[in-house]
Image (cartoon, rainbow, N blue to C red):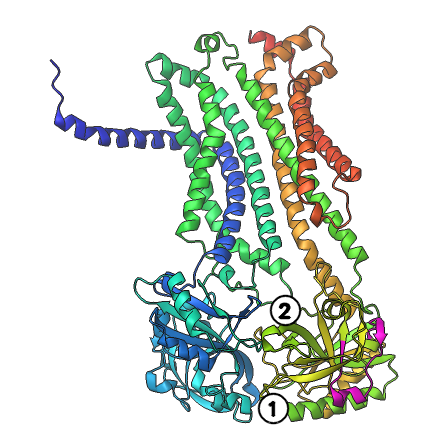
Amino acid sequence: MIIRSEGSSRMRPLHALESLWLDVVYAARSFRTQLGMAATIVLVLGAVIGLNTTLFTVLAGIAWRPWPGVSNPNEVVRLYLRDPSGQASGFSLVDALALSRAESLASVAAMRQETVRVGAGDAVSARSALMVSGDFFGLLGVRFAHGRGFLDQENQVGAAVAVISHAYWQSSFGGNPAVLGSPMQINDTPFTIVGVIAADFGSAEPAYDKSVFLPAAAYPLLNPQEPAYRSLLRDSTQCCADVIGRLAPGVTPARAQAELDVLSRGVASFSGNPATGIIVTGTSFASQPGRVDSAQAWATAALLIVALLLVWLIACANVGNLLLSRAAGRVGEIGTRLALGGSRGRIVRQLLIEGFILALVSAAIGVAVAFQLPFVVFRIVADPGTTGFFPFSVVPDAAVTTYAVLLAAASAIAFGLAPALLVTRADIVEWLKGRDAMPTRTFHLRGALLAVQTSVSIVLLVSASLLIRGVQRQAGEFDPGFRVDDVTSVRFELPEGVYDRARAVDFFDQVAQGVSALPLQAAAFASYDPFSRFRNGTAFHLPGQDLRQAQMVFFTNVSADYLRALDVPLRSGRYFNTGDIERESVIVNEAMARQYWPNENPVGKTFLMRPRGPVNEMVTREIVGVVGDVRVTPSTTVRPMFYQATRPGSDVYGFISRDPRASQAPVLVIRGTADLVQTIGRIAARVDPRVRVQATPLSDSRDAMLQTARWGPILAATLGLFALALTTVGVSGVFAYAVRQRRREIGVRMALGAPPSAVVHLILSRHARALGVGLALGLAGSVAASMILRYRLHGVSPFDPATYLSVATLLVVCGMAAGFVPARRATRINPLETLRDL
């Protein structure tokens, strides 16, 4: 009769934990004798996990991470009007505040970005401000480092209070808590600081890159001279505001959207179309309409994920070979433990724990890498005009850490399980006789790992090489559709707080008069640089159509000689003349002509557009010409657009850009020598010495843009070369291990007269088949990968023989280099010493 003790059953979990802890302690001690190998594994795997974790961090910030610093962020939604075409449009402040009647929303607030002038006298600087309405801070549950948000009475017209960001408080006020109650000049109006937002709210939208938060009711104080601003709180046609809301308890986004669709009836979107509903989204960066919803963006992310996972696979294969070599050296130890009654499962668990410890340390390094690498890469590949920070959170969090731990666990199994199973099947009797006790499958496993590393390296290198050749060919064939080589763009930075529209027009009129007297080949003004990706947008429809059929179209304001100065080809009609400025005539591009006037000449026809500024009725524009399409990047999709003849500077403050990087002052485009550029600077200085002038050759702008387009393939090539380096190190380690394992055999062969060439052949032949199989599989995989990438190769054949031949040659050279040192070491074995050990 067996009596089971209840106390002993309780002790079993404790015994299991104690046994597990002993395995961890034993594993840590075992690494002391092989610190070099452990450090190599940790560094290699840490770098690879760091790359994967970095990508996961960025994708998490883009795809699903909500705004930081917000309480219960999953309850916060963003709202957009939907026009008849299904496109998202902004609200007016009037309509945004009307949404507070919705029962599905506990609260609603609106926000609108503005550029304001902060300071007085010579200390004026341009700052990005967020104008907010309603209980914006209370809705989001934003914490304050000091002070408070806006009170209800401060949401009334005339309230001159401000909240500043934590970063602005640190940089401009030195982090002084006494800043509360201090005055600050904003657009020449005194405001009182009542709060400082906590740091965690400023790392992403909506506070990203914002210095000041002001009540929306303060619009008239900021721009008293503009009727459009005075009517923002009364006129429902004044656009645009972003709207946020917090869902009422128990309400889903779908239910909120159903109710809001009903409330949206009768509301007009900014394009002039009656709204057909409301779009309800979360607050993640990718959830906002029109951002990263293109298939191309997600396809690029998928390719990066696959490439990094392939590099991870190479690293696991490499580490697996190292652990296989280490396990072969521990046959005696493991065989003794088996002979003393140790179970095979217990020893396999011990070896897996050793691998898991190495993987966990590597994961810690990977997470540390993810804290800094996104910003390093961003600073390298970003456009010069960017701020150097992400508009979403890229700080590793619990999800990122979990991902790193899971990847570490997968790594431990991938590189540790097979060596552990093989070494526990070693023949202890053969080991006692001084012979190789490892099973013959060891060599098959080592060959398989070599084949995997080789094939994956080839796939990555061929894909990267094809992408680089495609980008190079695209750049070489790139034709923007306008003159570049001898053209310079001149920017004018007007002093803050001085220029209104009338004074700006006067300044540029005087500059234009001075420039007209210079011996230039051509000179003209435009609202944007030719290579700028920013354009104005307006609602547009043809005669006979109503507002419900209006669509959004892009346009650029230019002086009369702009298209002629850039040699934009004229397809029909004529270029602008000076009379077109008063008539505000337009010239359309070929894409617009094809889409809206197919099979007919649009010259002489008219269309209706919504002008900018306080005027909201549609106005008629006459088409006087059609010009060729222009591109600002090789991958730009040409969209319908038109050019409108205006006086230089007439639109300086008529359009407040939603992106602070977009230039507000017009750009002068000239064709002439460098000394004439300096003369233009002197002309501007005579008109106003406070205006700063910056000249950039269009060829420099083109080259910088093309370099930005190359970064993707360059990063892919870097990954491929990193994978090749890992493979080369792995091949060298395998050959070195083969020399150590067959030292006695080599000594005997050399004692019997075998030449060095036969010894080298003996070492290389054992794994040459694995390398050959890897080469064949890699080339086959490269063909499959290139077929997937064929739409990105821009005229380069997916079967380009030069690319495949160059990669294969590179691999052969690296393989020879990897095997050279071990093979040379084999030829220097002393036969007498090996015979003495027999």
Classify residue 184 by image quadrant.
bottom left
411 in relation to 254, above or below: above
Which quadrant is the C terminus positioned in? top right
From which residue to which does the magenta span run? 566-587
Classify residue 359 by image quadrant.
top left
Please name the amino acid that badge 1 sits on: Val
**Secondary structure of the residue carrying numbered label 2:** loop
Q: Which residue is drawn at 68% across and 15% down?
A: 762
Q: Is residue 234 rendered to the left or right of residue 777?
A: left
Q: Which residue is drawn at 46% across and 48% down?
A: 367
Q: Name the residue under label 2.
A: 385
Which quadrant is the N terminus positioned in? top left
Please provide percent x and percent y for residue 735: 62, 24
Of the residues under marks 1 and 2, which one precedes in the sequence?
2
554 in relation to 215, above or below: above
Please name the amino acid that badge 2 sits on: Gly
**Secondary structure of the residue carrying numbered label 1:** loop
Q: Name the residue under label 1.
A: 498
573 in relation to 439, above or below: below
